[in-house]
Image: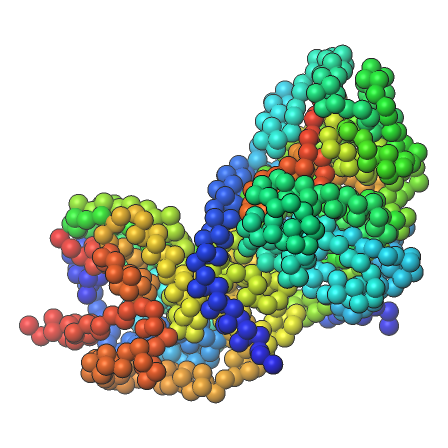
Amino acid sequence: MTNREVILGRIREALKIAAPPALHEGPPGPAAPLPASPQKWLPPVGETLEEQVQLFRRNAEELKAEFYDCTALNEAIQYLKKLAATGGWKNIGRHRGELTDAVARELGLQEVLTDHGYALNDLESCDAALTECDALVAQTGSVLVSAPGAGGRALSVLPPHHVVLARRNQMVPDLGAALRGAQEKFKGQFPSFLSFISGPSRTGDIERILVLGAHGPKKLTVLLLP
Amino acid sequence: MKTHARQFNESARHYTADLHHRELIQKALAGYYARRDEFKSRFQSWPAARDLAADIKREAINHLDRYLDEFVSRLEARGTKVFWAPGAKEARDYIIGVAQQHKVRSVIKSKSMTAEEIHLNEALKQNGFEVVESDLGEYIVQLRREPPYHLVFPAMHLTRRQISDLFHDRLGSEPTNDPEDLTMIARRVMRRKYCEADMGISGANFAIAETGMISITENEGNARLTTSLPKVHVALVGIEKVLPKLSDLALFLPMLATAGAGQSITCYNTLYGGPRQPGEPDGPEEFHVVLLDNRRTELLADAEQRDALHCIRCGACLNVCPVFKNVGGHSYGTTYQGPIGSVITPHLRGLQDWKHLSQASSLCGACTEACPVKINLHHHLLHNRRNAVRVYPAPLDNLLQTTFVFVMCRPGLYQLAARLGRLAQPLQRLIRGTVLDPLRAWTKTRSFPALAEKSFRDRWRERKTP
Amino acid sequence: MSMVQVLERLGHTVDYPEAQTCCGQPAFNSGYWDEARAVAERQMAVFRDAEVVVIASGSCGAMVRVFYPELFRHHPREKEARALAAKTFEFSDFLVNQLGVLDVGARFPGRATFHDGCHALRELGLKKPPRRLLQRVQGLELVEMNEAETCCGFGGMFAVKFPMISTAMGEVKCASIVDTGADYVISTDSSCLMQIQGILDRQGKAVKTLHLAEVLAQT
């Protein structure tokens, strides 16, 4: 018998007896259908895109992420130039993409491109990471990234400052919508890596005091473009 | 060889006398309570969310064979190697085998209670592999050579001073009072380890059957680094972690964060569905998932307590348990602490050795109230007590209970006993607090009230005869 | 006796079947369910003809209402157990939820805080009824303590099997009580009050424990 057969055998044997109803429930009846979307019970999200953007902003700020709603690409570029100057950025890590290409051209910094592999030491020495994303989630203030959409697994977590370039039409109301979107987009051929990023890296392990930049980025900046 | 029950009592005596420890834990949890309540209140209905979460887990656990098979077949279709481990030894041996096969020298680990459970680190070290814990709290207790204090907050019991001293002793760093400085010391150490490690080992919070992915929840980013940089990633996953659908995460991720850590959502929630796919710039060449039974199927077979397998390891029950808060996580002497630990450990490690944990409770029910998936925790402690009595009766207890029933079924005897109690009172006052005092366990720390002059029965009778 | 006085004041006829002894909870909590059943069956017989059973204790009330059905599940006398459970009420539950009474004409000047016994709070869901009753007591100032819902540490045999843990829990409770500056602490359960008074006395604190019924009986 294979290990699989051993374990499945144990499970099937165990499940021969049905679980009793909970103490306060009535006599067991036909199984009720599982309730619909969890969104009914989760925190409410606004109907309109504008409401969702405002909710995202509030949540992102609560999570200590920076959020900047840009009316044009140029605004984003100017803002990033300021960040680069104050941060003393010498080189940035990024991947190829419509938005990252446009921005990086103007920034004119040394780059580590991750698209076709990279040297770990090079990525380690980057002052910032510039990525796009798969979605922004209003309900939680999260950024959904994937290996193809954000330059791999390490780019968005290794350098100390992660900058996300997103378009307004990437805003989705909640986690459920983001997951459905991913399922539709990838049609079963998922990337090996997808991650919801909700703020800069943090820890409370020392006396429950919040410290940012535990292992991942200390700063997260989300720039929203039309 | 001291029994676990004896060790528990000794440790509990030590910690309950330590007022400094009690204060530290109260302080650590005060912020959690406030934030947890804030985020709970943002839910449109937290009770309804709990019902839904409980239903989803009930569906998953009661069809576990089907969902596990689905999970595995989807994982394998993307190139993941899956190993079914009936017990701890098989899991350890497999992981060591993978490390040997790849000529691994150093291993980096992210937080996994399942790995604690099977004592993986010791086994890896015995076989010559260097193992480093990357989660800050786990790294701290690893350096101190002690087990994690709490499922979710491993170093909750330590002050910054103690951590500074530890880092100074073991790493040669400058002493500092600043938590941020301390965190940066660990960050710098870890950077090197991530880059050097040949193998990353993680746990998993959820196993999604529909899409063949594991989901890992963390705040620090260490799990992401552990699973992105080394060329081999091994994930150790308890079979009960299964969720049927990807969309279930939309409910579980916020609930896990709120109940477990008082956050709206944890910083990184990452889905892993395979090794590096063609076209991806990085990621492990090999991805292994080790599915662990290790007597979970025995708990599954106990239909009455099966819902204990719904546990999402959030730690909410620990955070509200007055026993936990007073005896501390180390007193439990086993991987899983607090109420959930007291419920499941008899099943995973034996009823006779571990029934005392189910007895060391006032059954207040705060745990059941706090559980996001509505496990009937405190009632299961009662169930464990009943099972223990059936299988391992204690002669003295038996005698006591038989006497109790004998008296309580005979009102005349009951009244006689009450009268004798009144008569014996002055005598009891003489021996109070001494070795002869049968109530010494009480009177050592608490005063004992005098019985009323007249019993209710006497007063009732007096009313009837004017 | 206080409970009897209050119920009679409200115009009800109260009977006390003298054959009653104990709900059986000590055996039940220790895992001796067969023994608990034997004791429970006695009480079921004693109260068979009662219209309604009122208990001045959250833990005994919970034993009958919540645990008798569990104890007799799939047992020949399950229906009887459920019948007794359905007509048994803890005192404040009875007054507020069954009789719809909030003001029992009580008067008790003083500053008090309320301790939620775990059975009353979590098994019977009675957070509000005791407070609503106390709010109508003339002259009584009710203040909430931070740890109102935290277990006092009694827990039956737990108090003597694990006295160090029980005492530590009680100390946390008493510190919270003393913090409120109240002169009295009130609860629905005598066992909790015994634990709390036991520790307060040892600490030399002047706070006095009172049962809810005692307060409501004062005029």
Q: Count all numbered tags in the image, as a single digit.
A: 0
| Nearest the eye: C100 or B290 | B290
Locate the N terminus of chain C and report the quarter of the image it occupies. bottom left
Residue A188: image x %, image y %? 84, 41
Identify whether B227 is placed above or below A220: below
Q: Does residue B328 appear to the left or right of B185 in the view shown?
A: left
Identify whether B128 is placed above or below A191: below
Residue C210: image x %, image y %? 24, 59
- Colour mode? rainbow
Identify whether B455 is placed above or below B330: below
| Nearest the eye: A25 or B30 | B30
| Nearest the eye: B31 or A44 | B31
| Nearest the eye: B79 or B151 | B151
Q: Is residue C94 visible?
A: no
Q: Residue at x 6, y 72 (%)?
A: B466
Q: Residue at x 81, y 52 (%)?
A: B200
Q: Does residue B52 appear to the left or right of A183 in the view shown?
A: left
Q: Residue at x 77, y 33 (%)?
A: A159
